[in-house]
Image (cartoon, rainbow, N blue to C red):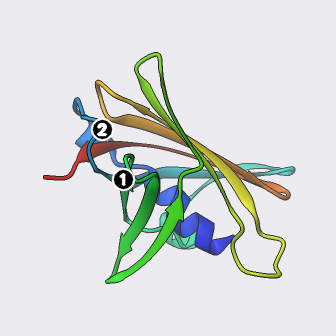
Amino acid sequence: MKRWIVICLGLCAGQALAAAINTNEVLLCAPGQYTECTPDGCAPVNYAEINAPRFIKVDVKRKRMESLQGGASATSKLDHVERIDGKLILQGVEDGVKNVRDGIGYSIAIVEDTGDMVLSAASEGVSFIAFGACTNLP
């Protein structure tokens, strides 16, 4: 699950970046506030606690996203990309570590006229939600 968290949760971006974006171009997203939920309740978590990257590059045309942190990178395929009601919806799954029950599914909504985004993800006994924003790469 840590590999997924590195790729997926980093798709959140800080509200300071919010502005109209072109979702046909490559996007840069940065982590905002994450919340982790279990059957016992929900609590805010820091990106470092869940091994999430500070920045993620989203390439909608190639249907992939890449974590950008400390010179290391990890890439994940976007299984579904769709535009609806002014939002870009990205969905996918990650198997995580081979032979470990850490697979996870995620959905990301990016508002095209502001860059605001919401990420939700679910796995066995845990879910995550994160808020933030994305912007176009120059």
Which residue is label 2 attached to? 24
| Residue type highlighted by circle 2 | Asn
Q: Which residue is mark 1?
A: 59
Q: Nearer the viewer, residue 35 or 58?
A: 58
Q: Report the amino acid beneath label 1.
A: Asp
> What is the number of the mark on residue 35?
none
Quarter where residue 107 is shown: top right
Q: Nearer the viewer, residue 120 or 80?
A: 80
Number of dots carrying numbers: 2
**Residue at horizontal 43 percent and vertical 37 percent from the top:** 117
Q: How far apart, in angstroms, are the residues tagged by discs 1 and 2?
A: 8 Å
Q: Is residue 3 visible?
A: yes
Q: Could you classify mark 2 by the number of other residues whose Cα lies within 10 Å: few (under 14), some (14-19), or many (20 or more)? A: few
Seen in the image, is 14 located left or right of residue 7? left
- Nearest the viewer among 95 and 44 is 95
Question: Horizontal and vertical percent for residue 130?
Answer: 53, 46
Question: Whole-percent x and y of residue 17?
Answer: 24, 43
Residue 46 seen: no
Q: Residue at x 53, y 64 (%)?
A: 76
Vertical order, 90 against 137 (above or below): above
Q: Position of residue 58 (x, y in %)?
A: 38, 53
Report crowding for label 1: few under 14, some 14 to 19, many 20 or more residues within 10 A (C-alpha).
Answer: some
Q: Residue at x 37, y 34 (%)?
A: 116
Q: Residue at the location (60% across, 73% down)?
A: 3
Residue 105 to residue 81: above or below: below
Image quarter (top left, top right, bottom left or bottom right) of the N terminus: bottom right
Q: Secondary structure at mark 1?
A: strand
State the residue lying farthest toward the top.
Answer: 85
92 sits to left or right of 52: right
